[in-house]
């Protein structure tokens, strides 16, 4: 399985073996990421598209061309389903990712950068497109060892990162703060809390356990406050389990479910953080 990372930036600047282009069936250029790739890569890409794909490509299929002036060596073009036009079969979107990796194997590309296929002009709901991309790439049998999921803006980048931490949690070392997060609590307060739990687990994957519980509490509290953007105790006056104390974080919203994306700070101060401190104390005795 390739190592999958979330990258903030412009896909055309990625220094990888191949970048993936979200194109259309005709493969003769267009807007969005397609326009950026043809624009910066130069006319060699279009010439190759015409020569190698005189009839274009079917939805869900992929094929390679030169990358022209781009830092990458190849562009792997794939045609995502047009959700806005009623193409809503998720297997087509999954096929784009699978086929793109098969083409990468054909040409010997080991590092590949993907945009979020179909989430622009084609209108696929973003959270679902992210889930489809990660699940398909993680399950692919491929020799590609590095996959970057590239987003142009910070909010989308955060959303990809959160989804990755939930779906492909990074390993945590023994003796790290992250190791305290290994077993998940039986009961969370709201669904966003499980995302926050895994985000903290990933953030602290390499952080050595401090020497005292107070430092640990400060570390965890600061991290929570940084993610949520409010002091841990800011909603303490709201009654326990009151949904008025819930904070919505779009990056934790997988796009379904009533409390999706909501974090409940009182749960963290009354349950989440004490659980972690207890585990720390148990390790020390
Ligand atoms: N780098 C990274 N991501 C980008 C870039 C870039 N330079 N430019 C756009 N994106 C992102 C968009 O924000 C979106 O999330 O790529 C994603 C895909 O958006 P589109 O390019 O609109 O692709 P798609 O939805 O698959 O529609 C394909 O759009 O422009 C036409 O010719 C293209 O007809 C095709 C259709």
Image: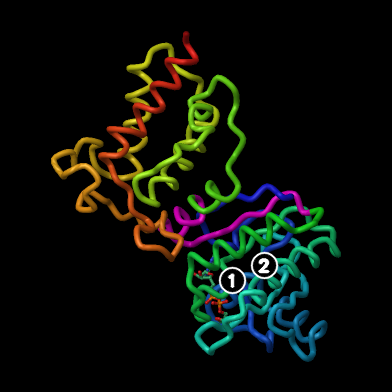
Is residue 36 highlighted in magenta? no
Position of residue 195 relative to residue 68, above or below, is above
Q: Residue at x 71, y 81 (%)?
A: 46
Left or right of residue 186, residue 4 in this image: right
Q: Residue at x 32, y 37 (%)?
A: 268
Does label 1 point to a residue whose CB lies under 8 Å from ligand 1?
yes
Left or right of residue 218, residue 143 in this image: right
Disc 1 designates what residue?
Answer: 117
Q: Residue at x 46, y 56 (%)?
A: 159
Is residue 145 highlighted in magenta? yes
Position in image of residue 176 (x %, y %): 53, 23
Q: In 3D space, how far apart are the residues under numbered discs 1 and 2 (Cα atoms)?
A: 9 Å
Q: Which residues are magenta?
A: 144-161
Position in image of residue 254 (x %, y %): 46, 61
Position in image of residue 197 (x %, y %): 44, 40
Label 2: which secondary element = strand
Farthest residue, direction left: 237
Dots 1 and 2: beta carbons under 8 Å? Answer: yes
Towards the viewer: 21 or 73:
21
Q: Quadrant of ligand 1?
A: bottom right
Position of residue 182 relative to residue 109, above or below, is above
Disc 2 designates what residue?
Answer: 20
Label 1: which secondary element = loop
Question: On the image, which quarter does residue 230 sit in?
Answer: top left
Q: Residue at x 53, y 82 (%)?
A: 83
């Amino acid at each position: 399985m390739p190592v999958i990372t979330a990258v903030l930036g412009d896909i055309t600047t990625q220094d990888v073996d191949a970048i993936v282009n979200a194109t259309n069936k005709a493969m003769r250029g267009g807007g969005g990421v397609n326009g950026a790739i043809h624009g910066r890569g130069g006319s060699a890409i279009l010439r190759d598209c015409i020569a190698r794909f005189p009839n274009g490509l079917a939805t869900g299929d992929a094929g390679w061309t030169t990358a022209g002036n781009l830092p990458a060596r190849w562009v792997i073009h794939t045609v995502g389903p047009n959700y806005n036009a009623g193409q809503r079969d998720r297997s087509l979107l999954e096929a784009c990712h699978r086929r793109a990796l098969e083409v990468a194997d054909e040409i010997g590309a080991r590092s590949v950068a993907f945009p979020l296929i179909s989430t622009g002009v084609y209108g696929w709901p973003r959270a679902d497109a992210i889930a489809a991309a990660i699940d398909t790439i993680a399950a692919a049998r491929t020799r590609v060892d590095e996959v970057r999921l590239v987003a142009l803006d910070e909010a989308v980048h955060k959303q990809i990162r959160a989804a990755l931490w939930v779906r492909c949690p990074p390993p945590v070392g023994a003796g790290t703060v992250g190791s305290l997060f290994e077993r998940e609590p039986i009961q969370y307060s709201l669904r966003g809390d499980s995302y926050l739990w895994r985000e903290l687990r990933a953030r602290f994957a390499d952080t050595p356990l401090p020497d005292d519980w107070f430092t640990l509490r400060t570390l965890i509290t600061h991290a929570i406050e940084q993610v949520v953007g409010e002091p841990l105790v800011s909603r303490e006056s709201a009654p326990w389990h009151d949904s008025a104390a819930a904070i919505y974080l779009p990056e934790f919203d997988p796009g379904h479910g009533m409390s999706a994306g909501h974090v409940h700070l009182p749960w963290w101060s009354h349950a989440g953080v004490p659980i972690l401190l207890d585990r720390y104390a148990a390790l020390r005795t």
